Amino acid sequence: MRRVTGPTDHVVVVGAGLAGLSAALHLLGAGRRVTVVERASAPGGRAGRLDVTDAHGTYRLDTGPTVLTMPELLDSALAAVGETTADRLDLVRLDPAYRAEFADGSAIAVHTDAAATEHEIRETCGPGSAAGYRRLRRWLTDLYRAEMDSFIGANMDSPLSLLGPDLARLAALGGFGRLGRRIARFLPDERLQRIFSFQALYAGVAPQDALGAYGVIAYMDTIAGVWFPRGGMRELGDALAGAAADAGAEIHYDRTVTGLVRSGDRVTAVRHAAADGGDGAEIPCDAVVLTPELPAVYDLLGRTPRRPGGVRWSPSAVVVHAGMPAPRPGAATVPEHHHTISFGAAWSGTFREIVDDGRLMSDPSLLVTRPGVTDPGVQPGGRELMSVLAPCPNTEVAPGIDWDRVGPAYAEELFGVLAERGLVDPGVEPSWTRRWTPQDWAAEGMAAGTPFSASHTLAQTGPFRPRNLVRGTANAVLAGCGTTPGVGIPPVLISGRLAAERITGPGPGTRIGPGAGARTRH
């Protein structure tokens, strides 16, 4: 594994998102002095926060990811500085992980427990599908074991890094075939195919086009389980930043990095200024970890690596948050689940609409999150905080969509869809809404107006993804969802560790599988 050369005593980490904080903790654990510079006023990066207050009280919004899997990666980062997740977070395991609802009126609750999900599938889809689920579950587990430590959790210097027994094992498992076809071999019922393949969209690829290897995402939420930190997802950034500060890291908020000072091929200092453009300063460093969006990172470095065809970006999403009246006791819409996936009647065609045609889904599949089901403290009494995510085209595929005009109308349309599907009471109105569209993501600096960064096509997977070492700079390392291993909370936490290892070398206990790190209090 290639490493940063020369002195590495003091490392500046640009960005206090989950990747940057993971890197900081692993660097601190390896004895480095660490300074973190963050443009926002709080940690978390894409795992953002917003408090909305109305006449009823305050709602604690998570403006970024709402699904937490693989908490052992939090364990690993915190263990680097001698802490455990239980020291910093109160994690609740969601059971079921989510409820899937379909256009024909059927529904399946997906549990981590195999017997519980098998029972749901047998009742809804029949005994043949239940047996297929058992086989699928074994396949997903084998896939995870073949991939996690050798590919997802490892630094790769070239495609040759793939060579080894796990590559042969992954190929034999069908990891380089198409995910949709592989899932269908286990589960002929299309409803089940959707449940165990929709996760590919998190990686920016339609399920029918995704590599079979991305079934590992379905492993993470349907087998390893889904969690929620009391207080909201914002607690993740607070926990990691608090542990880093207590371990000696200096963290500067409301500071925007404006440039890098170089001497030859080395970065010798990081320039930063107040977020309002005020007083600037330089922080000397021996090495730097860069976690912003890829285009911003390459601007700082002064060069963009040559890449045939450029970077292909993932689809985006419209996200609408709303403050709703709490459902009446006994009403048909009383929420019972933290996460509900509402599938429309259409399926493969909807992905063509957003990925290829640059159009909104004509029959959308939606992720509905009601965090107050798990933690009533995120919303006022008698009220309900609800978030709706609808996949949509990014600004590169659909540059002509006027989101100032389309956004409000589409948000209203989504609530109409939810009412038709029985997920909200059609007779009630939200007291407020807040929405994010591709235009808003772009305004926050996200390339192509997508919060999901570079898509996970074959040409942007593993050693073919933008690398975390940049040719021409001897002591700069990248972390975050644009580089290896990719998008999502587990990959970005891993990317922070991988970046730290480029500076310090692998530390003890870097295994990622079950049992890694200190255990979480559940």
Image (cartoon, rainbow, N blue to C red):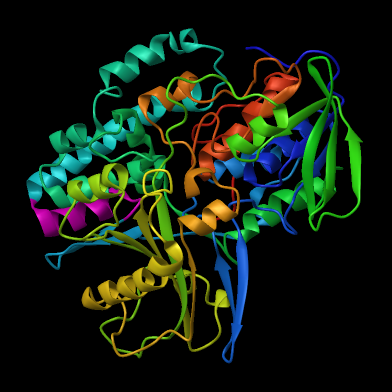
- Residue 193: image quadrant is top left
In this view, the residue in front, 114 or 367, is 367
Q: Residue furthest front?
A: 400
Q: Position of residue 250 (x, y in %)?
A: 86, 45
Residue 119: x and y in percent read 19, 55
Count of numbered circles on the image: 0
Q: Is residue 182 magenta?
A: no
Would residue 518 be visible to someone looking at this image?
Answer: no
Residue located at (33% from left, 51% from top): 113
Quadrant, the C terminus: bottom right
Residue drawn at x 30%, y 84% as measured from the top left: 425
Where is 498 relative to 128, above or below?
Answer: above
Picture coordinates of residue 108, whole percent (x, y): 22, 60
Q: Position of residue 139 (x, y in %)?
A: 27, 31
- Left or right of residue 318, residue 285 in this image: right
Q: Quadrant of the N terminus?
A: top right
Residue 164 as seen in the image, left or right of residue 142: right
358 relative to 52 in the view: left or right:
left
**Residue 284 as seen in the image, left or right of residue 64:** right
Residue 424 visible: yes
Above or below, 244 relative to 321? above
Q: Main secondary structure of the magenta part?
A: helix
Relative to 485, does residue 493 appear above or below in the rendering? below
Is residue 113 covered in magenta?
yes
What residue range appears in magenta? Answer: 111-126
Q: What residue is rendered at 45% in x and 13% in y?
A: 162
